[in-house]
Image: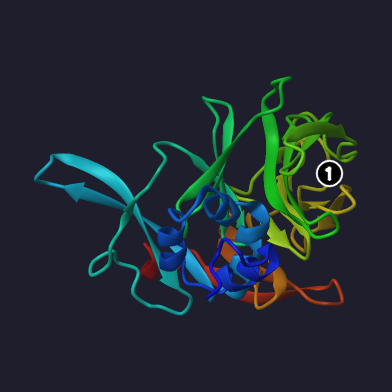
Amino acid sequence: MATAHNMCPELIVEIFTRLPTQSLLRFRSVSKSICGMIGSPDFIRLHSVRSPKKFTVIHRVNYKAEGVTKSVYTINSAGEGQLSYMGTTPVEYPFAYVNIVGSCNGILCVYEIDKRIIHLWKPSIRRKATVLFPPVWTPGLALGFGFDPSIDDYKILWTVRGGEVSFVYTMKTHTWREIASHADMDRLSVVKSPMMCLFNGALHWAVKRDSRRSGGCYVMTFDLSSEVFSTIELPEPSWETDTVTVIKGCLAVVSSSSKDVDASSRIWVRNTDAAWSLAFKLDMRDPRLS
């Protein structure tokens, strides 16, 4: 009878990437080699692709008996309406104070700015990898994370405030390297997006130009394969845009206006022909929204 020790590595990966997460958590104790395989970036990516779509929900729970409040998380299947942790087995959230950058293939990228470290966390198998910020520390403008299929590796982007310098970290080499930065960026530009958006192999952020320059807000992009920055102009550049997301397979932004004549929020969707169309409008003066 074949065992994991005498089976070919390719067959082991083929079998294990199709197993449910709970089984993988148990099999990590079989051997060091299997534990290392399950925690590898290649395995995590393949398992994420083959697994049913899920999302992580972080809950703040008040434990009255202990007199403390803790953060726990649950993993929910896509389409589930129930987001409560009640009736589930929540797992303690492994971070205290972090900022969420974004996610890719089931891996969540977060950072602790005070400690100058980045974590790549896989909630389903409770594993994380820690990356130090570039050695030459400078306050950052944008941070992004995604997968580059051209080299089959994950990358982290760090753009220094002002856009003069950018660095890329690749997981396989465990090194940072400097790349050409964004030519349209200026020292007073501000990234408005609380999190980056990964779409069609590129990172996207909403950016507000220096108020002394014309143009207002736009979308800054970074292609993970070519490592080239680009811009996408918005349909309402004078409006405040702080959210870039994906709706039904299309890039979308949420913009808002504080002017009394048009105090509304709008969702714009960019179609396949690169044209923006208005998908939804919400009048913020509606008393029902108070």
Looking at the image, the residue that sits furthest to the front is 1
Question: What residue did someone put label 1 on?
Answer: 214
Against 70, residue 45 (above or below) is below
Residue 230: give x, y in percent of width and height: 87, 51
Against 72, residue 96 (above or below) is above
Numbered marks: total? 1
Residue 125: give x, y in percent of width and height: 47, 57
Closer-to-camera residue (175/278): 175
Closer-to-camera residue (62/254): 62
Residue 119: give x, y in percent of width and height: 56, 40
On screen, residue 203 versus residue 12, left or right, reads: right
Residue at left offset 65%, top offset 78%: 248
Residue at left offset 67%, top offset 25%: 139
Identity, as a three-letter code, of the amino acid under mark 1? Ser
- Residue 166 visible in the snapshot: no
Against 275, residue 45 (above or below) is above
Against 106, residue 95 (above or below) is above
Check disc 1 and report its element: helix, strand or loop: loop
Closer-to-camera residue (19/221): 19
Q: Residues within 10 Å of mark 1 (few under 14, many from 20)?
A: few
On screen, residue 61 versus residue 196, left or right, reads: left
Classify the position of the C terminus by image quarter: bottom left
